[in-house]
Amino acid sequence: MSLFAALRLPREILFGKGQRHVLPTVACKFGRRALVCTDERFAGTAVFAEMVKSLRDASIEVLVHDRVLPDVPRDTVGVCVEEAESFRPEMVIGIGGGSCLDFAKCATLLLSHGGRLQDYYGEFKVPGPTLPLIAVPTTAGTGSEVTPVAVISDPDRTLKVGISSAYLIAAVALCDPDLTMTCPPGLTAIAGADALTHAIEAFTAMRRGEDPDLPQKHVFIGKTALTDHFALLAIKLLGRSLQKACMDGTDADARADVMMGALAAGCAFGTAGTAAAHAVQYPAGALTHTAHGLGVATMMPYVMTYNRCAAAVEMAEIGRALGLSANGRSEDEQAGAAIEEIRRLFAAIGITSTLADLGLPADKLDWTAEQALGIERLIKNNPRPFDLAAMRRLVQAAHDGDLAACAN
């Protein structure tokens, strides 16, 4: 097999303690008028006030939209864009968690190309470049600062929907782990588990071959040599520091590891894609109204067990990245150890262990399985194929907490 890879990333990634202080210097490269998108909580912090002041001190006019809501309700983006049009921003700066960054991507899209968000659902619907976007994450999980995807909630649809295009990728990802220091343990755990799930699903994704047209036809193209590099880095960093960051939020080294891990996971799955854990979470999350990261992490050990027969080599490597010793064990045995370590880590940081505990009703399992199987862009990425019966068994096993049943 010859080497084949593709990677879509920001023009510039800046990472490290104190990087938020260079925001004015970075922004000045793009113009003198900035729309800043954030949420009400972060807008009320001293850190945010300092960041806005630094922009204005650099002679950058700033319009702040501080009403971003969780899960980006579709119509809220249009409200922001309508308010911002007369301001004529030359750039958009998203500051906050994944919803704030996704909101900023959507605002950038509509300011640049007009229309409605519904016009752009799916892959490759964005017609061309957008206003420059500077993404400044304050949580470590979604990887949205480097990915080509924005996920929103549409009131006319049960499941969340995505807009996928390389044109949505931020011009600059500015990542300062100090911004995560006040993130509470529960959110640190859910966001970090989301990132680790991204990395595992990207690394175990289907390898689709070497068709030169593949990246031109699909945003998510499966695992490649380059996405594998970032996925393993993410697994290593999150494996060694996520629990530490949850237990002691003042551990600066652990915070940096987790934020770099989330960034690297985003670099991996932004091209490789995710798979079955995410497919199940979309309908399960819609029914339970639970956090995305909590749902995908709940599913991850079950999906790994289902995929073990098709991806034992990759799972053994995941185990080694997590710091597990081979100890003369076969690759399949190492794969099993990796699954157990993920279960242990997630339990230690408070991740729900079953779909039942997540609140998914037993009478909704068939619907959940049907909806998950229908999300083709994710299911086609899974290393082991699914039919409806197999998906139904997986969902039932995850609901009951029966890990062994997933291997069938």
Image (cartoon, grey):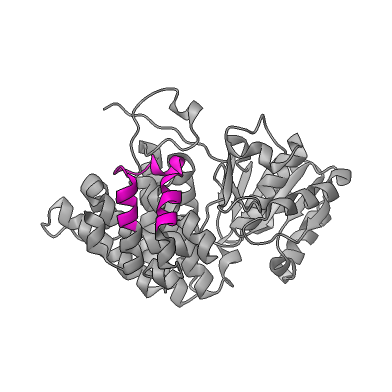
Residue 121, visible in the rendered structure: yes
Q: Is residue 399 rendered to the left or right of residue 84? A: left
Residue ID at (44%, 52%): 278
Magenta-span inclusion, residue 379: yes
Front residue of 9/197: it is 197
Instruction: Name the quadrant containing residue 310.
Output: top left
Q: Residue furthest right?
A: 86
Q: Is residue 291 left or right of residue 319?
A: right
Name the residue at the front extreme: 363
Q: Is residue 84 above or below residue 240?
A: above
Q: Whole-percent x and y of residue 11?
A: 59, 38
99 or 323: which is nearer to us? 99
Identify which residue is drawn at 30% across, 50% down.
390
Give the position of the C terminus as an image quadrant. bottom left
- Whole-percent x and y of residue 194? 46, 59
- The percent position of residue 289, horizontal first and vertical second, equals 55, 65
Q: Along the line of sight, which residue is nearer the eye, 350 or 125?
A: 125
Question: Residue 122, image x and y in percent?
Answer: 57, 38
Tell me the residue at 68%/37% (across/down): 119
Q: Residue 324, can we see it?
A: no
Q: Residue furthest left?
A: 328
Range drawn in magenta: 366-394
> Which secondary structure class fits the magenta region best?
helix
Total numbered circles: 0
Q: Is residue 166 magenta?
A: no
